[in-house]
Image (cartoon, grey):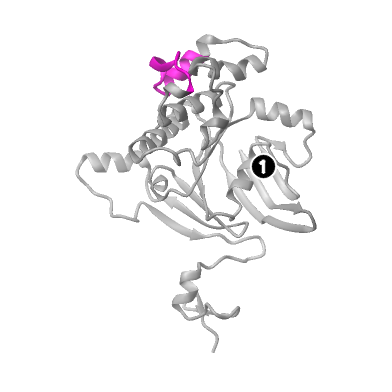
Amino acid sequence: MIHCDGLVKIYKIADLEVVALQGLDLQVESGELMAIIGNSGSGKSTLLNMLGGLDRPSAGQLTVDGKNLLTMSEKDVVRYKRETVGFVWQNNGRNLIPYLTALENVELPMLLQGKRKRERALELLEAVGLSHRRNNKLNQLSGGEQQRAAIAIALANHPKLLLADEPTGSVDTKMANQILDLFRQLNREMGLTVVIVTHDPMLAKKVDRVVAIRDGKTSSEMLRRKSYEQELIHSEEGVEELEGESHVEYAVLDQAGRLQIPTNYLESIGADRSNKVQVILEDGKIVLLPPK
């Protein structure tokens, strides 16, 4: 579904150039449910904006559902945003029009395509558990209900890819869990590809793959040891999963064989104050040692 190869994004502010992405590589399979994490300024929001057609790459390759977002015309970008991708923002003011009801908000994207499908809108509100609030406006909905309405809006035009920017950032833990369970349900029942940008470590327990971005590159991936459904079964049977063992973390090698070593790892071997480490091959393992 998503193919990023050597993706670069440079912003120019007056005479200053800011490199937000510097050679990022990423593959996302169709029907995958995954999360992207990273500190502020790591480049994760920049990547999400480019996947959503809201910004253009400066260099590299970016294809989504076979469409080249680097060379796409403005007209095709508009069509892409209407038909291929759905977006859920953290700020509900960007998701919902306050003077419309929940039902009218969900209908709006379909009206923009020259269609009016109240039945489809009602089905989506039912799918996100909000049919009983269909005639309520923004100020009559809780934060969690607003986010559920936003998800229904994002699904209005049958997108193949759903992008969510910090979707649990403005709700409490209980509602966050319900929203993440809803993403899993939509992913499983609709075959929807879901990419979530977050800083919430709890989310890692709900998705199958977590990609960490640092300094504009993919630095590591965490893959689930066994499916979330299997973990639920074990939980019901009284078998507790040890904290931190649901996923295994891998460093990501780029095409030139480079990888990012976590700072705390380097500090632990006394290599934090130098830009050099010894690399030796020992008993089939690659070992990093501080400089002598």
Q: Quadrant of the C terminus?
A: bottom right
| Residue 90 spot, x, y in % from top left | 51, 38
Q: Nearer the viewer, residue 164 or 170?
A: 170
Name, please, the residue furthest toward the left: 238
In this picture, residue 283 sits left or right of residue 246: right
- Image position of 253 with respect to 104: above or below: below
Q: Does the image show residue 284?
A: no
Q: At numbered mark 1, what does the secondary structure look like: helix, strand or loop?
A: helix
Q: Quadrant of the N terminus?
A: top right
| Residue 167 spot, x, y in % from top left | 48, 38
Residue 131 within the magenta-colored segment of the rendering: yes
Q: Does the image show residue 70?
A: yes
Q: Amino acid at mark 1?
A: Met
Task: Identify the residue at horizontal 38%, vertical 15% (top origin).
Answer: 132
Task: Identify the residue at horizontal 35%, vertical 41% (top origin).
Answer: 173
Name, please, the residue furthest toward the bottom: 292
Please state the total of marks drawn on the protein image.
1
Q: Nearer the viewer, residue 24 or 47?
A: 47
Task: Identify the residue at horizontal 50%, vertical 69% (top origin).
Answer: 263
In this picture, residue 128 sits left or right of residue 91: left
Residue 243 within the magenta-colored segment of the rendering: no
- Report the magenta residues as a range: 121-138
| Residue 97 spot, x, y in % from top left | 56, 23
- Image position of 235 with respect to 188: above or below: below
| Residue 50 spot, x, y in % from top left | 67, 42
- Image position of 117 with respect to 202: above or below: above
Determine which residue is flagged by label 1.
50
Around disc 1, counting alpha carbons within 10 Å, would you say few (fewer than 14), some (14 to 19), or many (20 or more)? some
